Image (spheres, helix red, strand yellow):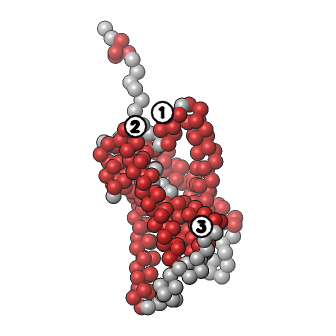
Amino acid sequence: MATEKDSSPDKLKLKTEVGLLGGVSLIAGVMVGSGIFMSPQYVLIYIGSPGASLLIWAASGLLAMLASLCYAELGTVIRESGGEYIYILHTSGNIMAFICAFTNNIVLRPTSMIAVALIFAQNALTPFYDDCQPPNGAVKCLAALGIMVLTVVNCFNVRSSITVTVLFTAMKVLALIIIMTGGVVLLIQGDTSNSLQNFFEGTKLSIRPVGIAFYQCLWSYDGWNTLNHITEEINHPEVIIPIIILM
């Protein structure tokens, strides 16, 4: 005879398929995105000097690190997926959590995804147009195609999306290594354009350029909270999340 326990439905649970490597690749893949390849030039243009630019990058990195440490503690205490939505739900109630989710899903996430997709499409098509900018139609079509491909990949399962994330993370880190190597070679050759001698010359200290520079830096650092959105899919989140944050 079937008992009441046998007839009761099992509680829906997410598969814990994200380990240490997947978590590191997810954080690195989101943070090392289009922003780091585009923002440095705008930070330098708005703030006016290499020294002030480096200070703003350091201050933004410190702010992102402190915020990620707070999220590491929250992820070990509240082991639920959803990130800031779950934290606001537990602390401020349903209305504030709904406003957070509505703003993220309707405004922040779509616009951020569009910006990243357009930057990706622009950079991907530029080598094919030596003498002019890529056509807007081609850029928009490639951006839309990229979003659709990533959507399909994420619809399959977590493992496939993590595999794609690891692959693209390796490619982006390799690109950054190539860029940094080129910069080091120029420094060794002495091609500094007097930037080291006049480190803070031309610094703009008004509110607007400093604010825009901080915005560009923080946009590049954005993604440090991504892991907390999939807490329930991480193997032993109380161990994995702090390790990844401290790395």
Camera-side residue of 192 and 228: 192
Q: What residue type is labelled 1?
A: His
Which of the two discs, 3 and 1, sits closer to the camera? 3
**Tag 3 near tag 2, CB within 8 Å:** no
Residue ID at (38%, 47%): 72
Under circle 1, the secondary element is: helix
Q: Which of marks 2 and 1 is nearer the N terminus?
A: 2
Camera-side residue of 163 and 241: 241
- Assign the C terminus to one quadrant of the image: bottom left
- Check the image and name the residue furthest to the top: 1
Residue ID at (44%, 91%): 190
Q: Distance between the residues labelled 2 and 1?
A: 9 Å
Instruction: Find residue 90 and report its horizontal and vertical position in percent.
Output: 48, 33
Report the residue marked by disc 2. Answer: 78
Residue 185: image quadrant is bottom left
Q: What residue type is labelled 2?
A: Ile
Report the residue marked by disc 3. Answer: 210
Report the residue marked by disc 1. Answer: 90
Q: Earlier in the sequence, mark 3 or mark 1?
A: 1
